[in-house]
Image (tube, rainbow, N blue to C red):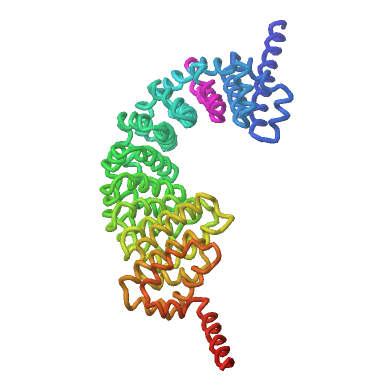
Amino acid sequence: MATRAVLQTFERYQKERVAFVTAVAEMAKNPQNIEALQQAGAMALLRPLLLDNVPSIQQSAALALGRLANYSDDLAEAVVQNEILPQLVYSLSEQNRFYKQAAAFCLRAVARHSPELAQSVIDSGALDSLVTCLEEFDPGVKEASAWTLGYIAGHNAELAQQVVDAGAVPLLVLCVQEPELSLKRIAASALSDISKHTPELAQAVVDAGAVAYLAPLVINQDAKLKRQVCCALSQIAKHSVDLAEVVVGAEIFPKILTCLKFPDEFVKKHSATVVREVAKHTPELAQLVVGNGGVGALVDYISDSAGNNRLPGIMALGYIAAFSETLALSVIAEKALPPLVSALNEEPEDHLKSATAWTLGQIGRHTPDHAKAVADTGCLATLVSLESDGASSEDLKTKCRRALKSVIAKLTHLPALDALVHRQLPESVMKMVLEQVGKVLANDAAGRAQFVHSGGLAAVQQMAEAPGSKLKEAVEIINSCYPEEIVKYYSPSYSQQLLEKLESMAATTTAY
């Protein structure tokens, strides 16, 4: 009888522990409960339950602590201060697969907030245990471990290097080859987080053979996996020509271009980023993109996208056009200018306008034909407006100014220049326009008459006589293309001179 009473007491104690830790873990799901749980001292009560002799209680305690730590960096810091990490790390190598997943989740929840907290996780000895978990049979344990390693590596190059030094990369590459989709996704994401920081880290990922297994997954129909794979390939390709060539050598073209039409917005954005990171390095790589139909695919992409999703496509076209007049001509031929001008006019964010202005400058800077194609879109007036708008960021003003300078310096189409002469332009921009007009008129007899009939010559004379004008030298070059009588006729002071002459004649006649 006494034995039964004792057993019932212990059973009740166990049930209450289970009920308590399960309830706290459930309540921790709701952000509204976090502050109340913290004030009630939930963390101090959960810590000893990590050492409980009932595995399910240990698991629920780790899960609850992870949810608390996930909520804010203050609570994650509290997990560190309460010396909970060493117990979690110990359990990663000793406990069952369910507890390992919960412990890895808790470590991830701490590491995600800041480099300092991620370093605390490393200092607790977690890396070796997490890497060991990548060799577990259970996919869930591998997934939880890969996720945590990705969060740690994502903060900075130093932390990523420690993950590499722990031997994680070859095991992550093996995870990419596993049949489970979720494991493939998270392993690809972790490899991306490692690769993004430096060429050396990206090279470590390449040396482990990652690209050969990532590249075929570009055609996988799972949207989340495609996102992570494209992201990883772009992070590898961005650092150097050699790394970009490794990615290209895995035969991602033209497969990667089909992703630009995939329904998922993030897949499209990340695949456009891959194209950008490949195209930016050399004319040969840019030509490879063009040869595979990349320009047309990018034009369709930026036509159908909006906001930040447009950015990699816009920049990819700029990088391609920058290398040579032939490549820039292929961008023009694929009708890239209308959607670029549309982005310049419609996008509200300055950084998108800056990228578009830069790309237009790269297209128009090669020859008069390129410059005319850009000018014919009417975008020069928009660039001028943005450059002189006080609300524009300094970067946007600079990009617009440089684009205008690049295009105007090559522009020989007089009507386009004439249209700018009649606008209210900043003096620095007007000086560029007038200097170019002078160069064109010097070799264009028909254009000289046209410039007079349009009112351009008269407008130029007024600029020269404006107080404090710095345009006189440029105006004199234009005037040198015309007979002195015509220049005088269109000078603002000419009518005054005629009146004075008439008055002088009248005075002389009266005297007689």
Q: What range of the chain is rendered magenta?
A: 93-121
Q: The N terminus is located in which quarter?
A: top right
Residue 511 versus residue 66 in the image, above or below = below
The answer to whether residue 345 is seen in the rendering is: no
Residue closest to the far front: 512
Image spot of residue 40 (x, y percent): 74, 24
Which residue sits at x=48%, y=22%? 97
Place of residue 326 in the rendered image (x, y in percent of width and height, measured from the top left):
27, 58
- Please say whether residue 21 is one of the residues in the magenta stretch: no
User: Which residue is rendered at x = 45% and y = 25% of the image?
Assistant: 158
- Residue at the location (55% across, 54% down)? 392
Residue 106 shown in magenta = yes
Q: Position of residue 284 (x, y in %)?
A: 25, 48
Please give the name of the residue rendered at 50% of the width and 61% of the height, measured from the top-left corner.
427
Q: Position of residue 359 (x, y in %)?
A: 40, 55
Q: Which quadrant of the structure image shows residue 176? A: top left
